[in-house]
Image (spheres, grey):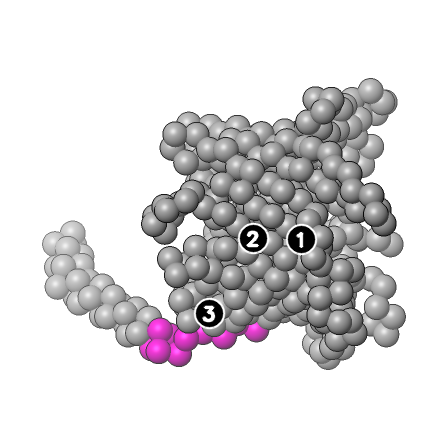
Amino acid sequence: MERDMRHRPSVPPSGVRGIIRSIFCLFSLLSFCAKAQQESSYEEFKNLKGKVLSVEENYYTSLEHSRNRTYEKLYKTLDIFKRCLTFDELGRAWIFEEYDTPKHCLKKKVFLYDSLSRPIGYDELYDTGELNYRKRDNYWSAVYTYPQDDPDPKANIISALVYWGDLLNEHRTYTYDSTGLLIEENITHVEHDRDKVSSYGTCLSYTYNPQRQLTKVRWEATSSGDVLYTDIYRYDSQGRVIRKEHWWDNTSFIKYSYEYNEKGDLSIELKEEGDLLERPKVKSKEFFYYAYLYDTQDNWIKKIASTDSGIYLVTERIIKYNEEWIVKSEKHHSIIHFLLFTFYLNYGLRTHHHLR
């Protein structure tokens, strides 16, 4: 039985200035409605606590496989078996890898930065063990542009060029409001068919609430104005996404509802698919449940995903920290615990005696 392999949802940007998030916006929005997918990118790794050097995720389709560190003999159930993200000495995302078998790296992406620590692009190589480095079919790259002569490390990207090998694949331009929120993204898609080159445009518009949280994304065809899809987001008082809707033609939809545990990780997910023009309007409804095991830094290192039919995915993480930071962190917590204990001895016991 085919399972929905997605993990927790990526929270949409409340202030979109990071180009990494901007560039992946289209792909993450497309993966929003994709079925039988795992976590679509490294976005979830951004929520890691502490000074992390690297994180590796391994995926298993049962607890038995997880316990024995074994994979299925036929690599068909999962598209991706392992993901790794390495950070540089400044804590920036550096190298992201995906493996489609336990040992074969399907994709390797290297993130690039300028002297102001601003992202300036990436190099992405598919099927790294089998094909030549710059072969067009497996090599992608991007170049980001900032306002000319702007030394601000937090400056917004104004355009991006995405290449497929040495051929231009996309040209993106970004428009922001007076507060720096991304409000429009225009994309020129370039198609190459032998000696012929053609292009077409699409436009993404973004709407926010007073809390600067993204509430709507609208994707239109530039020439016709036809709406390709609309995404809608709703949040709780803590700024977490609790409702996400994806609409085609204002009738067909996929809706997600989310609940979180005490640590802020997704615990229950409801997925509904349907069409307003059909009866019943909701064609399918399915619950997904997530349980976690955490390390001493409050990062989860094991996640068990299940439906009413049982467990379908076990994710295990190997997180490497900066050892010097861990020592300082443990000393910090020890000092806090000592102060709290001292406060209790000097004040709590007297209060307790007085109440008696």
List x then y, in percent, for residue 285. 76, 38
Q: Residues within 10 Å of mark 2 (few under 14, many from 20)?
A: some
C-alpha separation, residue under disc 3 versus residue under disc 2: 20 Å
Evaluate if marks 3 and 1 touch, with contact meaning CB atoms under 8 Å apart. no
Q: Which residue lies most toward the front here?
A: 195
Q: Which residue bears the numbered disc 1?
A: 163
* Residue occupying the point 65% across, 67% down: 108
C-alpha separation, residue under disc 3 versus residue under disc 1: 25 Å
* Residue occupying the point 43% across, 65% down: 91
Q: Which residue bears the numbered disc 2?
A: 143
Is residue 323 visible in this depiction of the protein?
A: yes
Rendered-image quadrant of the C terminus: bottom left
The answer to which of marks 3 and 1 sits earlier in the sequence is 3
Q: Nearer the viewer, residue 100 or 172?
A: 172
Q: Tell me the kind of residue under disc 1.
A: Tyr
User: Is residue 104 inside the magenta stretch?
Assistant: no
List x then y, in percent, for residue 165. 71, 59
Evaluate if marks 1 and 2 touch, with contact meaning CB atoms under 8 Å apart. yes
Q: Secondary structure at mark 3?
A: loop
* Residue occupying the point 63% across, 42% down: 171
The range drawn in magenta is 317-327
* Position of residue 126 in the picture relative to residue 266 (left or right): right
